[in-house]
Image (cartoon, helix red, strand yellow):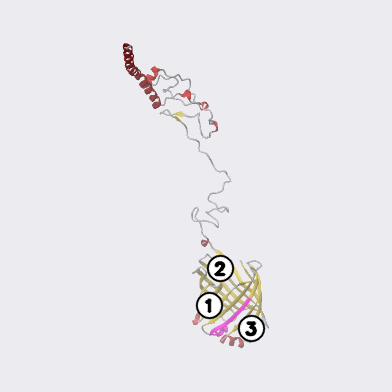
């Protein structure tokens, strides 16, 4: 019994030794297989049979000897992998990929590159020549080219602001018939200008016709310059015609819109022989509706010295005050009716009495106001 136990113990002691010996003998094969698998991963050699859609021909599984050769760097022994003659896989072998629907991909003209990657020619440039009726890129939406015409510009795509354009306007403030107790006359008062927002040429003219003759007339040609947003400075000349001697003046004045919407016009004049004069005008517009407008107006003329040839005395010579009610059919056209009081003062009143005229009179007026 003791001998049997000793045999069993001897066998149990020998078993671990035998296991270690077997593991030692099998270790080179494990190491070789592990090295072969690592080499396959490093060189990109994969089992393509397990990859769906990739048909590279018939490939045989490398044998142990071939794997040993692969471990030593010899890759020519692998069937189905011809590394000497590189080729491009057929697009038809890739399921789910429709290469005919891919524009710009020329698979027939592909050439192999030196490093084994397949090279392709660049896709053709799309587009082409513009159609014959394409819009000129140097023309605006209105069809005017930027190189000529009323919208010409100094350079390509160089914008012109509104204050760089020139405009013009003619405004007939009063074109009316004037009736008094014993006479009827016609009167006019207009202003025209042409230029830009800052500098423009200004024409002022007013006068009165009685019995077909020019009783009085005054014409001014001025240069207007904007000094603020609502005020213009005027500099120029004035010429007086009508009855009596003709007179010429240098003119300097201002015209604009004061606070509370009063339109003011004040001009000083210098003439020959030390003559001087001052003209003041003020207007206001009271809107009953957007079309029915009442316009009060007052005007005064003052002179520095007597002028016997024209029947004008020094100081306050003439004063006019009146109201006109107009209806704007359009903003550019408005008939009106009104009443105005006119009076002469000082030496001017004496000249009027000497000529058989009443120095004070009330006038009924009717006329039209327009502009364009």
In-image side of 112 versus 146 (left or right): left
Mark 3 / mark 1, whichever is N-terminal: 1
* Residue 361 on image: x %, y %: 64, 83
* Residue 70 on image: x %, y %: 38, 21
124 is higher (above) or lower (below) than 368:
above
Residue nearest the observer in this picture, 273 or 94: 94
Q: CA distance from mark 2 to mark 3?
A: 33 Å
* Residue 37 on image: x %, y %: 39, 24
Q: CA distance from mark 3 to mark 1?
A: 29 Å
Q: How many numbered callouts?
A: 3
Q: Residue under circle 2? A: 193
Q: Residue under circle 3? A: 361
Instruction: Give the quadrant of residue 281.
Output: bottom right
Q: Residue furthest front?
A: 1
Which callout, 2 or 3, points to the residue nearer the camera? 3
159 is higher (above) or lower (below) than 201:
above
Which residues are drawn in magenta?
306-323
Q: CA distance from mark 2 to mark 1?
A: 21 Å
Q: Residue under circle 1? A: 248
The local crowd at label 1, few if under 14, some if 14 to 19, many if 20 or more residues have their Cα within 10 Å, is some
* Residue 204 on image: x %, y %: 56, 72
Residue lying at 61% horizontally and 87% vertically, measured from the top left: 353
Q: Which element carries disc 3, helix, strand or loop?
A: strand
């Amino acid at each position: 019994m003791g001998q049997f136990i000793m045999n069993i113990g001897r066998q149990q002691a020998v078993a671990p030794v035998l296991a270690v010996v077997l593991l030692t003998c099998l270790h080179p094969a494990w190491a070789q297989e592990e090295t072969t698998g690592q080499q396959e991963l490093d060189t990109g050699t994969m089992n393509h049979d397990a990859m769906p859609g990739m048909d590279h021909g018939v490939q045989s599984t490398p044998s142990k000897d071939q794997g040993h050769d692969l471990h030593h760097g010899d890759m020519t022994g692998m069937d189905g992998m011809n590394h000497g003659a590189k080729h491009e896989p057929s697009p038809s072998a890739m399921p789910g990929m429709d290469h005919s629907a891919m524009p710009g991909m020329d698979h027939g003209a592909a050439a192999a590159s030196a490093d084994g990657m397949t090279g392709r020619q660049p896709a053709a440039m799309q587009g082409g020549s513009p159609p014959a009726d394409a819009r000129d890129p140097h023309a605006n939406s209105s069809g005017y080219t930027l190189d000529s015409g009323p919208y010409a510009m100094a350079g390509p795509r160089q914008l012109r602001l509104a204050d760089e354009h020139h405009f013009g306007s003619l405004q007939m403030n009063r074109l009316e018939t004037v009736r008094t107790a014993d006479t009827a006359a016609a009167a006019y008062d207009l202003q025209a200008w042409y230029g830009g927002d800052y500098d423009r040429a200004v024409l002022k003219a007013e006068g009165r016709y009685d019995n077909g003759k020019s009783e009085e007339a005054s014409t001014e040609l001025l240069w207007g310059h904007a000094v603020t947003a609502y005020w213009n400075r005027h500099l120029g000349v004035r010429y007086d015609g009508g009855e009596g001697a003709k007179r010429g003046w240098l003119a300097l004045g201002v015209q604009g819109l004061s606070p509370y919407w009063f339109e003011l016009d004040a001009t000083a004049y210098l003439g020959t022989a030390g003559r001087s004069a001052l003209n003041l005008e003020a207007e206001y517009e009271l809107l009953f509706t957007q079309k029915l407008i009442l316009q009060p107006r007052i005007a005064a003329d003052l002179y520095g010295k007597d002028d016997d040839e024209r029947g004008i005395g020094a100081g306050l010579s003439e004063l006019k005050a009146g109201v006109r009610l107009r209806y704007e059919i359009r903003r550019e056209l408005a008939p009106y009716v009104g009443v105005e009081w006119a009076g002469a003062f000082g030496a001017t009143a004496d000249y009027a009495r000497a000529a058989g005229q009443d120095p004070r009179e009330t006038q009924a007026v009717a006329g039209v106001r327009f502009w364009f």
